[in-house]
Amino acid sequence: MLEEECGPIMRAILAQPGHNWLIPIPLSFLEDEFNLVGLSDRSDLSDVDDSLGFLINDDENDDGEAAESLMTRDGAMDRDLCRVFYAVHQRYVQTRTGIAIVVNRFEHGVYGRCRRHHCHRMPLLPCGQSSKCGYGVRLFCPKCRELYLPEGSA
Protein backbone atom coordinates (compact mmCIF):
# COMPACT_ATOMS: atom_id res chain seq x y z
CA MET A 1 0.00 0.00 0.00
CA LEU A 2 1.39 3.37 -0.98
CA GLU A 3 1.25 6.35 1.34
CA GLU A 4 -0.80 8.17 -1.31
CA GLU A 5 -3.55 5.54 -0.89
CA CYS A 6 -4.07 6.20 2.83
CA GLY A 7 -6.21 8.94 4.29
CA PRO A 8 -5.10 12.41 5.40
CA ILE A 9 -4.81 11.52 9.09
CA MET A 10 -2.56 8.53 8.47
CA ARG A 11 -0.49 10.61 6.02
CA ALA A 12 -0.13 13.27 8.74
CA ILE A 13 1.05 10.66 11.26
CA LEU A 14 3.52 9.16 8.77
CA ALA A 15 4.84 12.66 7.94
CA GLN A 16 5.75 13.46 11.56
CA PRO A 17 9.50 13.66 12.31
CA GLY A 18 10.87 10.25 13.26
CA HIS A 19 7.98 8.36 11.67
CA ASN A 20 9.70 7.65 8.36
CA TRP A 21 10.03 3.94 9.20
CA LEU A 22 6.34 3.41 9.83
CA ILE A 23 4.30 1.84 7.08
CA PRO A 24 0.74 2.76 6.07
CA ILE A 25 -1.96 0.48 7.45
CA PRO A 26 -4.71 -0.55 5.02
CA LEU A 27 -8.22 0.54 5.93
CA SER A 28 -9.37 -3.10 5.71
CA PHE A 29 -6.95 -3.99 8.55
CA LEU A 30 -8.32 -1.15 10.71
CA GLU A 31 -11.93 -2.13 10.01
CA ASP A 32 -11.45 -5.80 10.96
CA GLU A 33 -12.37 -5.97 14.66
CA PHE A 34 -10.24 -9.10 15.13
CA ASN A 35 -7.11 -6.99 14.56
CA LEU A 36 -8.15 -4.56 17.30
CA VAL A 37 -9.04 -7.03 20.08
CA GLY A 38 -7.69 -5.96 23.45
CA LEU A 39 -6.53 -2.47 22.50
CA SER A 40 -9.19 -0.81 24.66
CA ASP A 41 -8.01 -2.85 27.67
CA ARG A 42 -4.38 -1.71 27.50
CA SER A 43 -3.37 0.65 30.30
CA ASP A 44 -0.86 2.52 28.12
CA LEU A 45 -3.55 3.56 25.61
CA SER A 46 -6.40 6.02 26.07
CA ASP A 47 -9.20 7.25 23.79
CA VAL A 48 -8.81 4.09 21.68
CA ASP A 49 -12.30 4.23 20.16
CA ASP A 50 -12.02 7.92 19.22
CA SER A 51 -8.54 7.43 17.77
CA LEU A 52 -9.64 4.43 15.72
CA GLY A 53 -12.63 6.47 14.54
CA PHE A 54 -10.26 9.15 13.25
CA LEU A 55 -8.02 6.60 11.52
CA ILE A 56 -10.91 4.75 9.90
CA ASN A 57 -13.13 7.72 8.99
CA ASP A 58 -10.11 9.73 7.81
CA ASP A 59 -11.26 13.25 8.56
CA GLU A 60 -13.58 13.14 11.55
CA ASN A 61 -14.34 10.92 14.51
CA ASP A 62 -17.72 9.56 15.58
CA ASP A 63 -18.59 12.89 17.24
CA GLY A 64 -17.89 14.82 14.02
CA GLU A 65 -14.69 16.35 15.43
CA ALA A 66 -12.50 17.58 12.57
CA ALA A 67 -9.02 16.21 11.85
CA GLU A 68 -7.49 19.67 12.35
CA SER A 69 -8.24 19.38 16.05
CA LEU A 70 -5.68 16.54 16.25
CA MET A 71 -2.83 18.97 15.76
CA THR A 72 -1.39 20.52 18.91
CA ARG A 73 -0.15 24.11 19.16
CA ASP A 74 3.40 23.09 18.19
CA GLY A 75 2.18 21.21 15.10
CA ALA A 76 2.62 17.70 16.54
CA MET A 77 -0.11 15.09 16.25
CA ASP A 78 -2.30 14.20 19.22
CA ARG A 79 -0.34 11.85 21.51
CA ASP A 80 -3.23 9.44 22.13
CA LEU A 81 -3.93 9.05 18.42
CA CYS A 82 -0.26 8.33 17.70
CA ARG A 83 -0.07 5.76 20.51
CA VAL A 84 -3.10 3.90 19.14
CA PHE A 85 -1.61 4.05 15.64
CA TYR A 86 1.69 2.60 16.99
CA ALA A 87 -0.20 -0.25 18.71
CA VAL A 88 -2.10 -1.14 15.53
CA HIS A 89 1.09 -0.71 13.49
CA GLN A 90 2.87 -3.23 15.76
CA ARG A 91 0.18 -5.74 14.90
CA TYR A 92 0.16 -4.93 11.19
CA VAL A 93 3.92 -5.38 10.69
CA GLN A 94 3.52 -8.93 12.00
CA THR A 95 1.12 -9.86 9.19
CA ARG A 96 2.33 -11.50 5.99
CA THR A 97 1.89 -8.24 4.07
CA GLY A 98 3.55 -6.15 6.78
CA ILE A 99 6.54 -8.49 6.96
CA ALA A 100 6.91 -8.36 3.17
CA ILE A 101 7.03 -4.55 3.27
CA VAL A 102 9.61 -4.55 6.09
CA VAL A 103 11.74 -7.17 4.28
CA ASN A 104 11.66 -5.07 1.12
CA ARG A 105 12.72 -1.96 3.05
CA PHE A 106 15.43 -3.98 4.86
CA GLU A 107 16.83 -5.27 1.58
CA HIS A 108 17.00 -1.72 0.21
CA GLY A 109 18.74 -0.41 3.35
CA VAL A 110 15.91 1.98 4.23
CA TYR A 111 16.55 1.51 7.96
CA GLY A 112 20.27 2.19 7.62
CA ARG A 113 23.41 0.09 7.46
CA CYS A 114 25.79 -1.21 10.10
CA ARG A 115 28.91 0.92 10.50
CA ARG A 116 31.13 -1.88 11.78
CA HIS A 117 33.91 -2.68 9.35
CA HIS A 118 33.42 -6.46 9.42
CA CYS A 119 29.68 -6.18 8.77
CA HIS A 120 30.33 -4.76 5.27
CA ARG A 121 27.43 -2.28 5.47
CA MET A 122 24.86 -4.94 6.35
CA PRO A 123 21.31 -3.50 6.26
CA LEU A 124 19.77 -2.90 9.69
CA LEU A 125 16.36 -4.03 10.86
CA PRO A 126 14.12 -2.06 13.26
CA CYS A 127 13.47 -3.88 16.50
CA GLY A 128 10.83 -2.87 19.04
CA GLN A 129 11.87 -3.78 22.56
CA SER A 130 8.39 -3.68 24.07
CA SER A 131 4.76 -3.82 23.01
CA LYS A 132 4.10 -0.87 25.36
CA CYS A 133 4.18 2.63 23.91
CA GLY A 134 7.05 4.91 24.82
CA TYR A 135 9.87 2.43 24.33
CA GLY A 136 12.11 3.46 21.47
CA VAL A 137 12.96 1.35 18.48
CA ARG A 138 16.48 0.02 18.14
CA LEU A 139 18.24 -1.13 14.99
CA PHE A 140 19.48 -4.72 14.78
CA CYS A 141 22.43 -5.86 12.67
CA PRO A 142 22.00 -9.54 11.71
CA LYS A 143 25.72 -9.88 11.05
CA CYS A 144 27.19 -8.69 14.39
CA ARG A 145 23.91 -9.24 16.29
CA GLU A 146 24.10 -5.87 18.01
CA LEU A 147 21.34 -3.36 18.77
CA TYR A 148 21.99 0.29 17.96
CA LEU A 149 20.23 3.56 18.66
CA PRO A 150 18.99 5.18 15.45
CA GLU A 151 20.83 8.32 14.36
CA GLY A 152 19.39 11.43 15.96
CA SER A 153 18.18 9.55 19.06
CA ALA A 154 19.06 10.92 22.44
Image: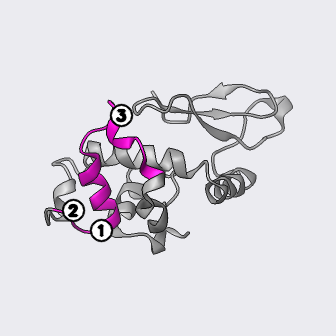
Foreground residue among 41 and 21 = 41
Q: Residue at x 49, y 35 (%)?
A: 152
Residue 86 coordinates in the image, percent (x, y)? 43, 45
Q: Are marks 1 and 2 in contact (CB under 8 Å)?
A: yes
Which of discs 3 and 2 lies nearer the camera? The answer is 3
Residue 102 coordinates in the image, percent (x, y)? 65, 52
Would residue 37 be counted in the magenta stretch?
yes
Q: Residue at x 38, y 61 (%)?
A: 10
N-term mark: 3 or 2: 3
Q: Give the residue number, with chain letter if any, for mark 3.
A: 42
Q: Give the residue number, with chain letter if any, for mark 1.
A: 57
- Residue type, mark 1 in image: Asn
Foreground residue among 71 and 132 = 132
Mark 3 → mark 2, Cα distance in angstroms: 21 Å
Query: On screen, 91 above or below 108?
Result: above
Magenta stretch bounds: 35-62
